[in-house]
Image (spheres, rainbow, N blue to C red):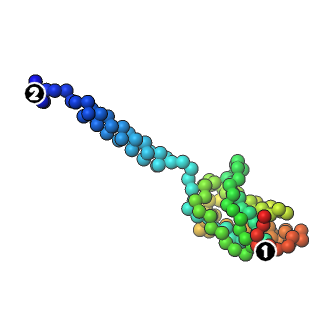
């Protein structure tokens, strides 16, 4: 029997199977990466021109769950990175222990404003009406 007539040795068969497995795994990783998990927005800037700090949360138009974007001190801007995409309609909630306000913006409005959202003046106005002392931070 010549070397050419001999069946492939087990180590060659294992290498072939290993190569096929590696190829299939690579394809799966690429497909998962393309189809991927949830989309994210690279950054969102929250501007707070009021005299009151605000905790900021966001959700989609279905109001299925709120995602915290952190706290934004009075008179400042806060940049949040890698924010879960809320979809076509974004609902922001600005929270203070004494009052909260919601603001709905479309994706198009956010894109046009370079993914920048501003705490509504009415949020600070209402806290002033309630006699809440201005503060840079809230607990």
**Which residue has dot 2 on it?**
2
The crowding category of the residue bearing disc 2, from other C-alpha atoms within 10 Å (few below 14, some 14 to 19, many at least 20), is few
Q: Quadrant of residue 83?
A: bottom right
User: Marks 2 and 1: CB-CB under 8 Å?
Assistant: no
Q: Quadrant of the C terminus?
A: bottom right
Circle 2: element type: loop
Judging depth in this view, the residue of 139 and 56 nearest the camera is: 139
**Which residue has dot 1 on it?**
51
Q: Does the rendering let one see residue 48?
A: yes
Judging depth in this view, the residue of 10 and 23 nearest the camera is: 10
Up/down of 139 relative to 31, above or below: below
Judging depth in this view, the residue of 21 and 119 nearest the camera is: 21
Up/down of 74 relative to 102, above or below: below
Say whether residue 109 is left or right of residue 28.
right
Up/down of 24 relative to 113, above or below: above
Q: Residue at x 33, y 37 (%)?
A: 18
Judging depth in this view, the residue of 19 and 121 nearest the camera is: 19
């Amino acid at each position: 029997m010549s070397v050419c007539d001999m069946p492939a040795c087990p180590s060659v068969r294992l290498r072939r199977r290993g190569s096929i497995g590696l190829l299939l795994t690579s394809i799966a990783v690429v497909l998962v990466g393309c189809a991927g998990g949830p989309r994210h927005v690279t950054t969102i800037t929250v501007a707070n021109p009021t005299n009151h700090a605000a905790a900021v949360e966001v959700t989609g138009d279905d109001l299925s769950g709120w995602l915290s974007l952190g706290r934004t001190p009075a008179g400042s801007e806060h940049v949040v990175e890698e924010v879960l995409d809320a979809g076509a309609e974004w609902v922001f909630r600005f929270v203070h222990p004494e009052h909260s306000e919601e603001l709905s913006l479309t994706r198009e409005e956010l894109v046009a404003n370079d993914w920048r959202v501003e705490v509504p003046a009415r949020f600070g106005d209402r806290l002033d009406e309630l006699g809440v002392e201005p503060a840079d931070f809230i607990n």
